[in-house]
Image: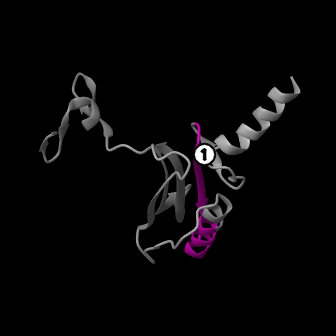
C-alpha cells in the first residue's frame, strides 16, 4: 500500500500538464483562466510572471498599444497533443477600460466551431480536417 501511495505522489508531479500556478486568475471551465487589469504595464507583468511561474521560458512578443496585445501558443513540453494559449485583448469590463487576459489549455489541433443563427434557430458548424478528411487547401492526401 505504501508503494502505491509513493507512486501516486510521484506521478502527480510528473503528469501535471496544465497551468499549475494561477492564483491571481479566475477559472472558467477546466484549465481555462481569466483576469482583467486596467493598465497595459500590469497586463504585461502578469503575463510574464504567469508564464515564468508555469516554467515557460522565452521571449514574449507584446504588441504595444494594439487591441490584441498578445496572442501566444506554446506547445506542452510533456504532451505535444496539447498547447497553452494566452490572449490579451483590450476592452471594457463594467464600464472600465483595460485588458482581458485569457489562458487556455487545449488540444493542439487545427479546427474551429461556430454557430450560424437562422430564423429557425442556430446551426452548429464544425470544421475538423482530421474528421472530415478535407483541408482549406483542398483534399488531404
Magenta range? 30-48
Q: Secondary structure at mark 1?
A: loop
Left or right: where 46 falls relative to 113: right
Q: Which residue is mark 1?
A: 18
Q: Is residue 94 left or right of residue 6?
A: left
Q: Position of residue 74 (x, y in %)?
A: 48, 57
Residue 113 location, x and y as percent?
32, 37
What residue is at 32 percent from the left and 44 percent from the top? 110
How many numbered marks are there?
A: 1
Q: Position of residue 24 (x, y in %)?
A: 70, 56
Q: Judge the density around disc 1: few (<14), some (14-19), many (≥20) Cα neighbours within 10 Å.
A: some
**Vertical comparison of 45 with 85: above or below:** below
Please determine whether, in this image, residue 91 is positioned above or below residue 114. below
Q: Indicate whether 120 appears above or below 18.
A: above
Viewport quadrant of the C terminus: top left
Residue drawn at x 47%, y 47% as measured from the top left = 80
Amino acid at each position: 500500500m505504501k508503494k502505491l501511495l509513493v507512486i501516486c505522489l510521484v506521478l502527480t508531479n510528473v503528469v501535471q500538464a496544465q497551468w499549475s500556478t494561477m492564483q491571481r486568475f479566475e477559472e472558467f471551465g477546466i484549465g481555462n483562466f481569466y483576469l482583467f487589469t486596467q493598465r497595459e504595464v500590469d497586463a504585461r507583468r502578469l503575463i510574464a510572471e504567469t508564464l515564468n511561474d508555469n516554467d515557460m521560458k522565452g521571449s514574449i512578443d507584446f504588441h504595444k498599444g494594439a487591441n490584441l496585445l498578445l496572442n501566444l501558443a506554446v506547445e506542452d513540453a510533456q504532451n505535444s497533443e496539447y498547447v497553452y494559449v494566452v490572449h490579451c485583448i483590450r476592452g471594457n469590463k463594467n464600464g472600465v477600460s483595460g485588458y482581458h487576459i485569457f489562458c487556455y489549455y487545449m488540444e493542439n489541433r487545427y479546427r474551429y466551431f461556430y454557430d450560424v443563427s437562422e430564423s429557425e434557430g442556430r446551426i452548429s458548424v464544425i470544421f475538423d480536417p482530421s474528421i472530415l478528411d478535407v483541408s482549406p487547401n483542398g483534399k488531404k492526401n
